[in-house]
Amino acid sequence: LGLDNAKSQGLVGEQPDGYLGVVKATPDAVELAADINAKRRAAYDAIAKKNGATLEQVAILAGQKAIEKAAPGSFVKTPEGQWIKK
Amino acid sequence: MLLSRQYSPTLAFLRRNNVWLIILALLPVWMLLAVVVTAFALGVRVQGLGWQSGLELAHWQRLQNGCVQARGERLRITGWRPVTIAVASVSLANCQAGRETRPPPWTPPFDLIIDALYIPGLPPIALTVRQREQRWQVWGKYQHSNATATYDRISGRWSAQGQIQAADIAPGLLGALTFTGHGLWQASRLDGDLQAQGQQLGHRGQSQRSDMRLEASLAAKKWQLNAELGAPLTLGGDWSLEARQVLRASGNLEGVESLRLDLRAAGPQGTIVLTLDTEGTGVARGQGMLTLAGPSLAGRVPIRWNRQGLELLPASIQLPEGLLLRWPRPLTLPLALAGESAISAELQYRDMEVKTVDSRLAWQQAKWNWQGRIDLAGKTAGYDLAGSWQGRIEASGLAGEPASLTVRGPDLLLALRVPVTGFQAPGWTTRAEFNGHYGNAPFTGALSASLARGRWEGTVEGDSRLPFYARGGSLKLVASWFGKDGQWYLGTGSRATITDGLVGTTLIKPIAVVATAPLRVGPPGVFGNVEVKAEGVVATRWVLPTVTGKIAVAGQQGRATLRVPAWQSELTLTAEPAGRGRNTGAKGMMEIRTPLSASMSRSLGFTLQQGMLNGQGHWQWQDDWRLQGDIFVSGLALDWGGILARGGNGAAHIELHRNGVTLTSIGPIMLAELDVGTLVRNIRMTVQSDLTTWHAVDVSADVLGGHMHAATLQWPSSQFQAVTIGRINLAEVAALQSDPNPTVQLAGRVGGNLPLQLTKDSLALRSGRVSNEGPLLLKVLPSAGVSAMGQSNRAVALALDALSNLAIDKFEARLNMQPDGWLEAAVTIKGQNPQKNSLPIVLNYTHRENVFELLRSLRIGDDISRRVLNRMPAEGSRSDDVEDTP
Amino acid sequence: CTPRIALEAPKDPITINLNVKIDHEIRLKVEKDVDKLISEDRTLF
C-alpha cells in the first residue's frame, strides 16, 4: 500500500502535528502510518538538531505546510481534530 | 393293498414275494412316523426335517398350551439300537403355565447328548442323558463344575450330587459348593432332601474365607430351605456379607410362601442391612427393610414382597460422593429371570438433580437394559444447568439420541450436544459439540472424550472472537485435557491464540498463550503456568515490540513476569481479588525495570537517549483503576531536538486514578546539565504535578557562572513569578555573543530579581532588576570593527576611548522580555576610567535582542550579525536615549 | 616659586548612550529545511 494511493483511498490524512493520521482503520493503513510517522519524526529531529529548534516546533511547521500542500479531496485534520476533505 | 392289478409284471413280482421288502423299505418311514407322532403328541413342532447319515432336524420347539417351553437346534439321531440323539443346543423357558410335575413317561432306551442346555438364569450346561430299563442317568458339566442325577422310573427314587466351583459363578470368587440330594418322584408325589456345603468361599481380593451350609427339603409339593453362613463372606472391594440369622424360606411349586432373611453387608462406604420377613405362614406375602448407614451411606427403604416380586416403597437413600437417590413411586421388581419394570428415580448431587421420565428397566437373565429419558436441572458453581437425554443403556454402553446440556450464567450461555453412539465400553468415546457466548463474545467448538488408561481424557478446540476487536482478533483454543483424582487438567502444550486484529486504530499482533505444564482447571479457577508471547502492537505514533513472559495462575491469584526483549524492559505484575461480594475487584503489585532508549520515544516530544527507570507500586481495580507507586530514574539523558539534557536523577511518587494523575517528587529531582545554548547546571527542585500543571518548589540552578533560585514556580501560569539570580558572571554573559574577537570585555558579578511568566510554550520577563554585586570592569578592546567605527565619528571615537577601560561601581539594569523572546535591557552604568585619571562616565546602554534566537544560534554555533548603533551626546550633558532601529 | 598643576577630576561625568540591537536570521533556515523535506521526499509526504 503506497502513501499516495492510501491518501487517494481516503485511508490516511495529514494532521496539524506534522504526522500522518489513520482515517479509516485497516491493518495496512495503520502499519503504513506507523512506519511513515517514525521516519518523519527522525527527519524532524535531524532538522531540529541542525537548527537548534525543538522536535515539536519543526513537526508543527511541517504539519502546516503538509496540510497546505495536501491534494484536494484528500483528508486533513482540523485543529479541533475533525477529519475533513480538502 | 393299494396297488392295482393292471400294473406291469415287475410290480406284480414285487407285489407277490417282496411284501417284506416293502415293509423293510418303509421301516425308516415308520420309525420316522412313530417319532413324529410321539413328538407331536408331546407338543413338539419340527422344521427342516432331513436325512444325513441319520435323521436330522434343524429346529424344533416344544409347545405347551401356547408357550414355547423348549427350543432346540440341530437335533440328529445318530444311532438306533439304542436310539442316540445329539442336539447342538436346547434352551428352556419357564412358561407361566401350571406346574405339573409328572415324571417322564415310558420311553425306549436312548442316549441324549446336548452340547449346550440353556436353563434360565444358568450358564449353558453340557448335558448327557442315558435311559436304560427305565433308569435315567443325567450328567451335567459347566467349566469346572459338574453334577450327576439318577432316577428310577419303576421305584420313583431320584438322587443327585455335584460340585460347583465359585470361580465358574463369577471371576474372582474362590471356594466350591458341593451338594447331595435324594427323594421320591411319582405321578402324584415329588419330595426329597438336599444338603449343600460351601467350603472356603471368599474373594481373590480379600484373605478371609468362610463356609456355608444349606438344607432344602421338598414334600407334598411344599419346599423348605434354610441356609447359614459360617463367617462373613468376602465379596471383593473390601466388602463382606454376613447372615445375622439363619435364612429360612418355604413355599410350593407356585413360588415362595414364606421368607426370613437378615443379611448385613459391610464395606468402606458403610453397611447395608436387608431384612425380610413373612406376614404369616403360607400367605406368600411379607415385608422387610433395606437400611443403609455409615460414613457415606444412609437411608431406610421399606420393602414388600409377594409371589410376583419385590416392591420397594418410595424412599431416599444417601450414596457415596454426596449422591442422593430417591424414587417417588414404588419400584416393583418381578422376581423372574426375565422381566420388565417401570422405574422412576431421582438422583440429587449437591444442588443438581437428575430425574428419570417414563423409564423402563428390562432384563433377560444376566442381560439388562434401561430405556427412557433423563432430565437434568440444577445449579453448580453459580451456573444453571439444564439437560436431557433419551435413549438406551446396556451393560456394554449407551445408544440413542445425542444428549443436550445447556449451561447458563450471568454472562455465559453454553449449549452442548453430546452424541452417545460412541459411548460404549471400554473406550466410552464421544465428541461433543458446543456453542454459545461469554459476554458478547460468541464461541463454538468441539470436545472429544474417552476413557483410556484408566482416566478420562480428550481434546477440546474452541473458536471465538473478541468483541472489542473491530476487525480480526479471533480466538482459537487447541487443548488436550485429562481428569486425574477428581481434578481436571489441560495438558502441556495446550494453546490459545488470538489472531492479529484492529482495536480502534491500533493493530494488535497475534498473541499466543501456551501451557508449559498441565493446568488444573476447576470451579475455584485455573492453577498452573503458561507462557505468553504477544508479537507486539502497532499504533500510528508508537510501536510496542514483541512481549514474552510467563504467567503463574493460582485460582484467583496470578503473577506475570513479562519482558520486552527489544527494550530489555521487565514488568512483574501480580493480581488477586479485592473486596467481597458484589463489587469484588482486583488488586496487586507491579514492578517495572527498564532502560530508557530512543526506540521508546517515538510518540514523545523528546527523545530518550540513556537512563534507567525502576518502579514498583500497587494497583487496584474496583469500579475504576487506581495505581500508586514510586519510580526512580537514574542516569537520564534526553533531548528535545536541539536542546540536550544529561545526568537526570530523581524519584517520584505517582498516583493514577480515573480523574487523572498526581506526581510528587521524593526529595529533589536533579538534572546535571541542560544545554539550551548555554549550559545550565545542577538543576534541582522538588515537583508536584498532574502532568498538565507543574508546581516546583525550591528551584535552583547554576547558570552563567552564578546561580538562580526560585522559592516556587508554576508552569504554565500567567503570573509573573519571582526568580532571584546572583553572582552572574558578566564575562560569561558577554561570551554568549560568541564573538571570535570580542569587542567588549566585562568582568564582575551581577544579581537581581527576574519576575518570569512561564506560559505553556513560552517565557516572558517583566521589570526584571539586575544590579552589580561589587565592582565591575568594562573594557572595549581595540579591534578592526571598533577602530573603523571611531574614524567615521569623532564622538564615537571619544566614547570608545572613554570606555576603553571603565571601573564600574554602579550597574543598574532594567529588563523586559516579550513572549516571542525579544529582550529589552536598559542599563545605567556609573564608573570612571582609571587611565583617564578617573574620568567619571555615565553609560546609558540599551540592548535589544531575541534571546530565544540567540540561544538557538548558540546551539548550532551560527554566527550572529551585529549592529551597533551609536549616538554620542555632547560632552557633559544628559541626553535622552535616542535609538533607531536599522 | 614652582608652577603647581593640580589635576582635578573633572567634575562633570561624560554621558554616553549606546544602543545595541542584535538580529539573528535563524528563523528562516528552519522553514527552508522543512520545505525542502516536504517537496523532495515523496515517500514521506
Image: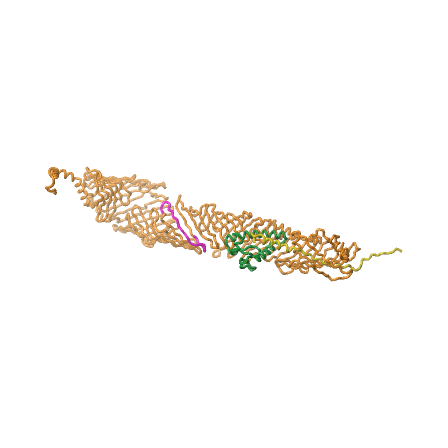
Chain colours: A green, B orange, C yellow
Task: Name the foreground residue: B449 vs C7.
Answer: C7
Quadrant that contains the C terminus of chain B:
bottom right
- Image label count: 0
Q: Is residue B438 magenta?
A: yes
Give how far across and how far down residue B653 sits, in percent: 58, 53
Q: Quadrant of residue B437?
A: bottom left
Task: Name the foreground residue: A16 vs B840.
Answer: A16
Q: Quadrant of residue B91?
A: top left
Q: Residue lying furthest left in this view?
A: B5
Is B481 located above or below residue A86 in the figure?
above
Q: Is residue B332 left or right of residue B2?
A: right
Residue B130 visible in the current orientation = no
Q: Quadrant of residue B824?
A: bottom right
Give how far across and how far down residue C16 sits, in percent: 75, 59
Residue B656 visible in the current orientation = yes
Q: Is residue C29 left or right of residue B346?
A: right
Task: Name the foreground residue: B756 vs B375.
Answer: B756
Quadrant that contains the N terminus of chain B:
top left
Is A7 located above or below residue B81 in the figure?
below
Q: Is residue B261 magenta?
A: no
Q: Which residues are magenta?
A: B423-443
Give how far across and how far down residue B866 sits, in percent: 70, 55
Q: Is residue B813 left or right of residue B375?
A: right
Give how far across and how far down residue B234 sits, in percent: 34, 43
Q: Is residue B569 left or right of residue B355?
A: right
Q: Residue lying furthest right in this view?
A: C1
Task: Name the foreground residue: B264 vs B76.
Answer: B76
